[in-house]
Image (spheres, rainbow, N blue to C red):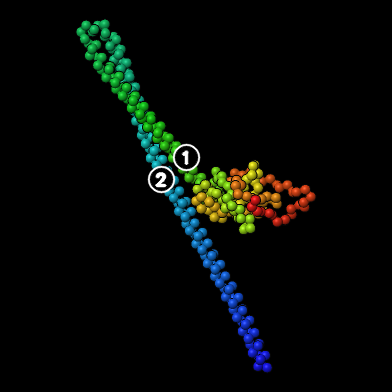
Amino acid sequence: MPILFGTLTALVLAISAWIGYKNQTEYEKQIAARQKEETNFKREVGMLKTRTTEWQAAIDAKKVLMKANEGLSEEIAALETKISAIKSEISQKQSKKTQLEAEVKAANDVMDKVGGVRALVPKIKGLRSDIAALNAEIEQGNATLNNLKQAKSDTQASIAVNEKRVEFETSGKSQPSLNTSIKTVYSSWGFVTLNGGDIQGVVPGSTLAVVRGDEVVAKLKVTTVEPNRAAADILRESVGDDVYLRAGDKVVAEATAEPAKPAKPAPGAPAANGAPKKVTAN
C-alpha cells in the first residue's frame, strides 16, 4: 500500500512539473509576442512622427513660397510703373526733339551765316543721347521684369507641386507618377518588397497595381515605407488562379493603372466560386 501511494504521489508530482513547464513556456512566448508588438508599435509611432514633420515642413515651405510670391508681385508692379514713367519721359523728349529739329530746319536758311543753328545742334545731340540711355534702361527693366515673371511662374509651379504631394499623402494615395517594380516575392507570407519607397512616391496604406503589358494582374496594400524601398501585402482576391507574381513586375499607383481583365479559366476547369487564389514567386 505505501508503495502505491508513493507511486501515485510521484506521478502527481511529475504531472504538476510538466504542466508548470508548459505554462512557463507559454508565458515566455506571450511575453516575446508582446515585446514584438510593442517594438512594432514604437516603430509605427516613429514613422508617424516623421511623416507629420515632413507634412508640416511642406506646409511651411508653401507659406514661405507664397510670401515670396507676394513680394515678387509688388516688385513687378513697381517696375511696370517705373517703365511707364520712362516711356512717358521718352515721349516728351521725342516731341521736344521733333520741335527742335523743325526749328533748326526753319531757321537754317536765315541763320546759317550767323551760327544760330550751331547753338541748337548740341541740344539735339544731348537729347538723342538721353533717349538712347532711356531706351537702354527700358530694355534692362524689361529683362528684369521678365526674370521676375519667370520666378513668379516657377514659384507658383512649386506651390502647385507641393499642394498636390500633400493632397495625395494626406488622402493615403501614392503619387500618380510612381513607377517602380517588385524586388522580392514572399509567397508563403503573402507580401512583397518593392524597389521604390518614399522618395519615389510610395505612401503607407495606399493600394498599388501590378501591371504586365496593359493588364493589371494583382493589387498590393502598402504596409511599410522607407526612403528607397517598401513592403506591401498581396491582396489575394485580386490575383488570378494562374498568376504568379515575380521579381521585376511593374508596380504603379492604383489610380494610373488600367482596369484588371478577368482571368480566363483553363479548359475543362470548374468556375472559380470562392476557390483559393495562388500567389507564388516564379
Q: Upstream in the sequence, badge 1 or badge 2?
A: 2
Q: Which quadrant holds residue 68?
A: top left
Classify 10 Å Cα crowding around label 1: few (below 14), some (14-19), many (20 and above).
few
111 vs 217, nearest the viewer: 217
Query: Which residue in the structure is indicated by mark 1?
Result: 157
Q: Is residue 254 visible?
A: no
Q: In the image as oriented, which residue stretches furthest toward the front?
A: 3
Query: Which residue in the structure is indicated by mark 2?
Result: 64
| Secondary structure at numbered mark 2 | helix
* Residue drawn where x is 42% and y is 37% of the image: 152
Q: Is residue 273 visible?
A: yes
Q: Quadrant of the N terminus?
A: bottom right
Location of residue 216 in the rendering, given as x and y in whole percent from the top left corner: 64, 46
Up/down of 167 relative to 78, above or below = below
The disc labelled 1 sits on which kind of residue?
Ala
258 vs 103, nearest the viewer: 258
| Secondary structure at numbered mark 1 | helix
Q: In the image as oriented, which residue stretches furthest toward the right?
A: 268
